[in-house]
Every structure is written in C-alpha cells, then in structure tokens.
Amino acid sequence: MRVIALTKRILQQLIRDKRTLGLLIFAPILVLTMLHLVFNGDDYVPKVGLVEIPEAIVDQIDTTDAEVTIYTNENDAQQAVHSEEIDGYILLDDATTSAVFLEGSDPSVNSATLRWIQSAFSSLQQGESAAQFEIDYLYGSSDMGPFDYFGPVLLGFFVFFFVFIIAGVSFIRERTTGTLERLLSTPLRKWEIVTGYVLGFGIFTIIQSTIIAWYAIYVLNMMMVGAFIYVLLITLSLALTALTLGILISSFANNELQMIQFIPIVVIPQIFFSGLFNLETISDWLSWVGPFTPLYYAADALRDVMVRGHGFGEIFVNLIILFGFSLLFMLLNGLALRKYRKI
Amino acid sequence: MRNQNSCISIQHVFKQFGKHEVLKDINLEIEEGEIFGLLGPSGAGKSTLIKELAGLDVPTSGENYIFGERMPTLKLMERIGYMAQADALYEELSANENLQFFASLYGLKGKKKKERINEVMQLVDLSDHLNKPVSNYSGGMKRRLSLAIALLHEPEMLILDEPTVGIDPVLRKSIWDAFYDLNRKGTTIIVTTHVMDEAEKCDRLGLMRDGELIAVGTAEALRNETNSDTIEQAFLVYGGATS
C-alpha cells in the first residue's frame, strides 16, 4: 500500500508540473519532426558545367536531375567553380577521354555531382545496351531513407534521455528538500521507495512512449513493418533502465547541475554504440563498450521490429537484457540509499 | 543498568565522520512524558544525535535504546514522529495531498486518515488552508504543516530538530502551545534549539558543545549550580570548565 501511495504522489507531482510534462512529451516529438525534415528533405541537385561539348551530345543528356550550364572554354568554368556557382565541370577532350573537375569541399556534394555525371554519361556511351538490373531487398526498400534507419535508434534515445533526466532530477530534489530524509524516517522500506518510483514513472512512461512512438510511426511515417505493441514493449523496458539508472546516478550528484554534467558521460556515448554509426568500423579498443550500454540492445530490438518486421522471438533476448539492467540498477539503488538510512 | 522510567537511553555513543569526531561518549537517559531540550551552538552534534534517535543514522560505537529496544528498527520508527530542520514538503502538491501521502506511509486509511488530518491541521491552526498548494504557503505555515505531518500517526515520541527556527515570536508561542498540548496527553518530546530563551520551556536540558554533553538538568538546577542568572551564562560556565 505504501508503494501505491508513493506511485500516486509521483503522478500527482508530474501532473502539476505542466512544463516538465510538456518537455517529456513534446520535446522528443519536436526533435523527431526536425530530424525527419532534415533527413527526408529533397535530394541535392548538383550544379554541373559542361565545357566544349558538342551540341549533339548535350541534347542527348538527361538534364532533369542537375542544373547544367554550358561553357565554351575551360577558364570560364574554372572561374565559376571558384565563385561556387557550379559544383564541378566535365571536359571532353575528344570522344573517348574526359576530365572531371570538382569544387570538392563537401563530400556529399561531390558524390551527388559524380553520381549525376556517371549516370548521364553512361547512358550516353552505352546507349540502349546498358544492362538493366533488377534489385530485390531482404529488408527495407529502395524508398527507405536515412530517417527510417536512424529513426528507431532516435526514438529509443529520446525516450532514454528525457526519462533519465527527469527521474534523476526529481530524486535529487527529493534529497535536497529533505523529503527523502522524511520518507526514511517513516517505516517505509528502501525497496518500497525504489519500487514506488519505478511504478510512478513507469505508468507515465507508458503514456509518453505510446504518444511518441505513435507520432513517429503514423504522423512522420517512420518505416514500420512490425507490430506496434513490440515497439511499446521495447521503449518501456528501455525507459525503465533510464529511470533506474537516472536515480542511481543522481546519488552521485549534489544538485541538478551536477546531474546535467552526467549527460555527456552516461547518455551521449550510448549513441555511438546504438547503431547510428556502423559498429564494425568503430575502433577495436572502444567497440567493447557497446554491449555495456542499454541503448545498444534497445536500438537493435527496435530496428528488428520496425525495419525487419521481426516478432517476439527475435527481440526477447534484448528485452531480458534490458530488464536485467533495470534490476541491477534497482538493487544498486537500494544499496545507495543505505547512505541515508542503514536499515 | 537502564532506568525503568526512561524511554530513551543513550549509552556511550560515539560518532565519527571520517576523522572528524561528531559525538564523543554521549550518555543520557530521557524519561517518559518529559520535554527534553538539547541546547548548543550549531555544529555541536545535536542534529546527529537526534538523527540517530529517529533511526536515520547509527552510532560508530555505543547504543541507543528507545522504549527498551535498540535502535534502529522500522517497528520503533513507527512510534516516533520526526521533524527535520528542512520543511520537507512537496511544494507542487496541496497541504491535503502532502498529508494524505504521509498518512498512507504510516498505514492510515479511510475515515481514520481523514479524522487525523483534520485533527492535526486544527492543532497547528491551518484548517482553513487545507487545500492550498504548499508553494503558496508562508515560511511559518510550512513549518507548521511540517509539524502537522510529524504528528499524523499519533507518535508516542516526537523528535524535533529546531522546530521554531526563523519563526516570529507569536507563531513560536503557538507552536509551543501545541507541544504542551501534546505533552499533556503523554507524548515525550525531544527538541533541539540554539535559542536560549526557548530552553526555559523544557522540563530538562542537555547542553552540548563540540560533540560532548557538558551538562544535564532542569533549567533552574543548571542556573543554580553555576550561580548564573540565565541559561546563557550557565552554558558559558560549563563550556569554559571543559575547554
């Protein structure tokens, strides 16, 4: 019953604190929307110059995906590159040899320019004989954008980040206002405090992650082939680890600012191992960290469900590991509370 | 060895934080039904001592007995009401919600809970402000609400750390009236203070300085023994004698 009282109080406090409530729900939605717009924006249109190219050839080139400018001598084209009017130009010395000159400061612009030049001229040279490949995908599809791949990771990350902060800060507040001492002067057991916190924030987190996941999937059209319920299950178990870790970390901080200082140490590095960057390319002396971060398992499970459409069989190991993390952090929390009361 | 009437028995209690000795060989018996004042400057170890009595800390060596049982146990803590120096209230919530929460922690339910809430709020004269958010309370009101919470479960013993610090004389008197009220009903009260005139209100006093209990007795006895007119002077004599 004491646990229920604590759970109820935490929910009451959250509901009173409209700003925190807003932060927990709308901040992830806002950031996800912005990322969606950034990653799924229009493709870059390269600005390409053609130098001394016969008009017969120019007519054959498909210029729909690029801004093409025609120059009569190379000097003019070079000038245009210097003044960043064009990203690069192509020069045909004779029918067989050609040279490409790029501005070159932005790798993504370089590759967009090269890709256009390649496709424009390969069709030109090989004509209709160009082989037609038909491409099939095991998972995903040709219209899968980067947002669809990053999305599950980001979804997990934002749930983790905000729950971590709010849980940690509210526990610090409990300590600095003296209410923790008062709680401990009652016959309340330490595990009851931890459980009450987990339940109170847990209930709120169910609502929070449902809204955020629903928004990402059905409003932003994040790729989603699996079942929604599994996404909720994963985000909830991730939120639980964030909650218990946040409370644990808060016992090493004396005030809210010191809690914020733990973000770059505890939260940010988890992104590196969550699959946002290819894990196989991470330097060996760092890559072993990955399996020790909760986000690693949550991101893997989320991607399994959202991109690959896997079911419970594939994600349950990840879920068990996440719950294992939570259980470990809860036990450590009980120990950390011994600092304030011995029994 | 233990006195039959005493409800608190502190025996050879030492407390160390790192190298710093906060309590040095404290021995004290507090009798049932008395108002006992712990008097001393800040840093004397008063708060540490009563935190041990409230079950929030344990001595490095020595023993604390309450109602004949060795502290700390959760069962004993149920019989004690503790009020710390900080008000320890949830400011987002209303007074009623704060009271409801702490009442539930002590296992109060339903009608009994409601009754107790009304009783304690009447005692601290806050009945008209039951549903106000605590953030709208004045400092004195918060102090009284904090006291009301400590009284909710009808504790046999009240342990209060500087209950009237920063409170104006009128309010201080009304808080002390509440203490006398409870005391008449049989509640043992242990209170710390560094305000000398407040000391006169206690049945017996313990003077503390630098982690040592330098004198124990009624205010009158302490004054007579040192030929002083005030407790403050008596404190100086005892303090001077030991250093």
Image (tube, rainbow, N blue to C red):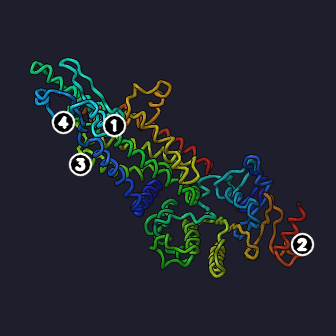
Query: Which tag, 1 or 4, sits closer to the chain's start?
Result: 4
Q: Is B39 left, or right, of B154 in this rendering?
A: right
Tag 1 residue: A82
Residue B204, given in percent of the width and then of the height, sits at 77, 70
Q: Quadrant of residue B188?
A: bottom right
Specify the amino acid type for callout 1: His
Tag 3 residue: A219
Query: Which tag, 4 or 3, sits closer to the chain's start?
Result: 4
Residue at left offset 68%, top offset 51%: B58
Find numbered disc 3 in the image and state the secondary structure of the residue it sits on.
helix
Q: Please tell me how crowded label 2 is: few (under 14), some (14-19), or many (20+) other residues with Cα within 10 Å.
A: some
Front of the two marks 4 and 3: 4
Circles 1 and 4 on the same chain: yes
Find numbered disc 2 in the image and state the secondary structure of the residue it sits on.
helix
Tag 2–tag 3 contact (CB < 8 Å): no
Tag 1–tag 3 contact (CB < 8 Å): no
B127 versus B241 height, above or below: below
Residue B76, given in percent of the width and then of the height, sits at 62, 57
Q: Please tell me how crowded label 4 is: few (under 14), some (14-19), or many (20+) other residues with Cα within 10 Å.
A: few
Residue A98, given in percent of the width and then of the height, sits at 23, 22
A335 versus A142 height, above or below: below
Q: Nearer the viewer, residue A155 or A49?
A: A49
Image mark 4: chain: A
Quadrant of the image containing the N terminus of chain A: bottom left
- Which residue reaches farthest bottom? B170
Front of the two marks 1 and 3: 1
